[in-house]
């Protein structure tokens, strides 16, 4: 094989440069076409083009407490009334609520065994 002349080398280099220019140009055109197609599709399907957003005429006022201190006092009074009154805690299971002073008195009279279980533990049936 004979060594290539500088003219042949330039021709091969020019062919490679031209090929890359064509590839990059085709890729750019494809990317631009795809982008325009997606924009058209989005406007067509979603109906975004020409849609107007109408802001509300007036916002609703915030719901604030008019008397926070009074509300807190009423809440405390309600809780105090529950602590000082008899009532049902769970009627279906027969649980009652008694005044806190009465409950503390009952615990105090039990002495050292105040927090022992009310019912003795059940022993498993040996026949089972």
Image (cartoon, rainbow, N blue to C red):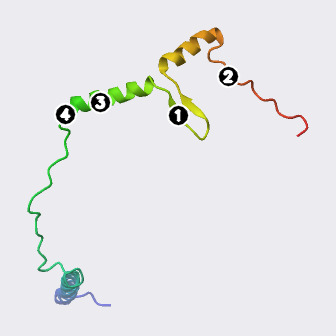
- The residue where tag 3 is placed is 74
Is tag 1's residue or tag 3's residue first in the polypeptide sequence? 3
**Mark 1 sits on what residue?**
88
User: What is the quadrant of the C terminus in the image?
Assistant: top right
Q: Nearer the viewer, mark 3 or mark 2?
A: 3
Image quadrant where one finds the N terminus: bottom left
Question: Residue 71's x, y, as percent?
Answer: 26, 32
Seen from the viewer's position, the closer of residues 78 and 9 is 78
Q: Is residue 126 left or right of residue 75?
A: right
Identify the residue position indicated by label 2 in the image. 117
Calculate the distance from the C-alpha at mark 1 to the C-alpha at mark 2: 22 Å
Task: Check disc 2 and report its element: helix, strand or loop.
Answer: loop
Residue for badge 4: 67
**Percent x, y for residue 39?**
19, 81
Image height of 26 relative to 89, above or below: below
Residue nearest the observer in this picture, 91 or 5: 91
Instruction: Return the x and y of residue 21 as percentages of the image width and height.
Output: 18, 84
Q: Earlier in the sequence, mark 4 or mark 2?
A: 4
Residue 14's x, y, as percent? 17, 87
Q: Earlier in the sequence, mark 3 or mark 4?
A: 4
């Amino acid at each position: 094989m004979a060594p290539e002349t500088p003219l042949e080398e330039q021709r091969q280099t020019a062919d490679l440069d031209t090929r890359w220019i064509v590839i990059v140009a085709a890729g750019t055109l494809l990317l631009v076409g795809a982008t325009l197609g997606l924009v058209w599709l989005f406007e067509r399907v979603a109906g975004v083009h020409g849609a107007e957003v109408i802001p509300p005429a007036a916002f609703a006022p915030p719901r604030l407490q008019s008397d926070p201190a009074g509300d807190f006092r009423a809440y405390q009074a309600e809780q105090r009334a529950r602590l000082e009154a008899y009532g049902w805690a769970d009627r279906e299971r027969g649980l009652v609520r008694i005044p806190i002073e009465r409950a503390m008195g009952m615990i105090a009279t039990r002495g050292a065994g105040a927090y022992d279980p009310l019912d003795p533990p059940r022993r498993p049936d040996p026949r089972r």
